[in-house]
Amino acid sequence: MQSEPDEPREAPGDAAEVATAVEDAAVDTAQEEATGESTETAGGETAAATASEEGKAGPEAVDALLEALAPSREAFHSSLAVTVDQVRGYLEAHETRDDDGSGRMASELGPFAAGRIDVARLTEIIGDSESISEAELVPMRRAFETLSAVMARGAEVHRVQVPAGGDLQGQVAAALAECGRIFGAARVFELARSGRYVAEQHEPMMEAFPFHRWNGKEREIAPPLVVEVNGADLHAGGLAEFLDGGQKIALAVSGQAPPAPLVRLITPGVFVMQTGDPNDVRAMAEQAGPAIAAVLPETAGRFVHEPGGDEALGRLEVSFLPDEAPRRDLGSVTAFQQQQELKMLTALAAASAGPTAAAPAAPPAGPASDVDLLAAWLIQQADLSDL
């Protein structure tokens, strides 16, 4: 077994295709929800230590993290806003009709038809093939209300506060289930539009839609989170289940903290960072895949793990290791757990500095910038004959 470190050490330093794939995923998802079949991915009280003022994550740190994740946040909200507008337009087009359906047709023909075309007579001739009943409109309205409610929360959907002694994994899961209501609403809208909505089965998806029920495309457009947590409650290993798709999580840690809590999350395809500067987290927003970062007190280890290619383990750069191993429990994080994490980081640092270290990974692609991604998934499906 490797001994604890005795002194600080230095270590060396196309959008259209995506939209089409998202549309396909929406169709598959609606089929699964309607038939009951699914290929979705699965998914003691302790006293918290009193947070010291040293290293406390204040409002400035949280604001800096939100700013660092601005590109991901803006892309998410832009897509959501476009979706809300298009769902509103769909409802208005189908609600502004008379019993004979002429109102909807007049809305589609526009001002040109006024005084020139007998819309009622035209409706009698060609029929109102897209007529929607009130029963079908009710869940669509609920879906619209759900989408609007999430949008109205603005930046708050990205903030999570873990109370002292709280469950980090549980709080993040609850926040993602709340954000996931937009995906539940998307499914409800599609199911209602195709006539397969069943209230008992599908209504709960708009109340909470947990991460383990999100499909691959939903995970790719996951909303980033900034999580405020005490170091004494920093059981970061529980967050591994959320590091998929495009999920970004930034932790603002208050008070004394374990020296290497995020080392448990290092895997080849995940960006992982421990730092003392919130501005460093901007590098996380540039990642196309899942990423997590923690802003910790200066006594904690500092490192960056960048994903490599399919065959590579990625690149690890460790810039600082504490000179002493923890000897006392920190809230619910035991001394043994802290020591094991530090030993693991020490071993990884030594391996990354050796002759067999992986070559630096190629610069990752930036996040998708198509703000119509979610809207395309919801709306741009005129042919539903294969559902």
Image (tube, grey):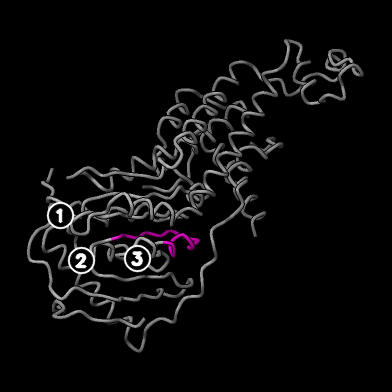
Residue position for label 1: 52
- Percent position of residue 120, x then y: 84, 13
Residue at screen point 36% across, 86% down = 356
Of label 3 and label 1, which has the lower sequence position?
Answer: 1
Kind of residue at badge 3 = Met
Q: Are marks 3 and 1 in contact (CB under 8 Å)?
A: no
Which residue is outermost to the top?
99
User: Which comes before the other along the chain, label 1 or label 2?
Assistant: 1
**For mark 2, what is the residue?**
259
What is the x, y in percent for residue 96? Answer: 70, 17
Residues in magenta, as a range:
282-295
Tell me whether the residue at label 3 lies in contact with that at label 2, contact meaning CB atoms closer than 8 angstroms. no
Seen at 34% across and 51% down, the residue is 62
Kindly give the residue lying farthest to the front in the view shown.
Answer: 60
Q: Is residue 356 left or right of residue 344?
A: right
Three-letter amino acid code at the position of disc 1: Ser
Q: Nearer the viewer, residue 200 or 271?
A: 271
Quadrant location of the C terminus in the rendered image:
top right
What x and y, as percent, mark residue 323?
15, 76
Q: Nearer the viewer, residue 291 or 298?
A: 298
* Image point (46%, 39%), residue name: 154
Which residue is labeled 3 in the image? 273
> Disc 3 on helix, strand or loop?
strand
Instruction: Assess whether residue 76 is covered by the magenta stretch.
Output: no
Q: What residue is rendered at 28% in x and 53% in y?
A: 238
**Please, what is the three-letter code of the amino acid marked with disc 2?**
Pro
In which image quadrant can residue 369 be found?
Answer: bottom right
What secondary structure is marked by label 2? loop
Q: Nearer the viewer, residue 224 or 276?
A: 276
| Secondary structure state at the residue bearing disc 1 | loop
C-alpha gap between disc 3 and disc 2: 13 Å
Distance between the Cα atoms at labels 1 and 2?
A: 16 Å
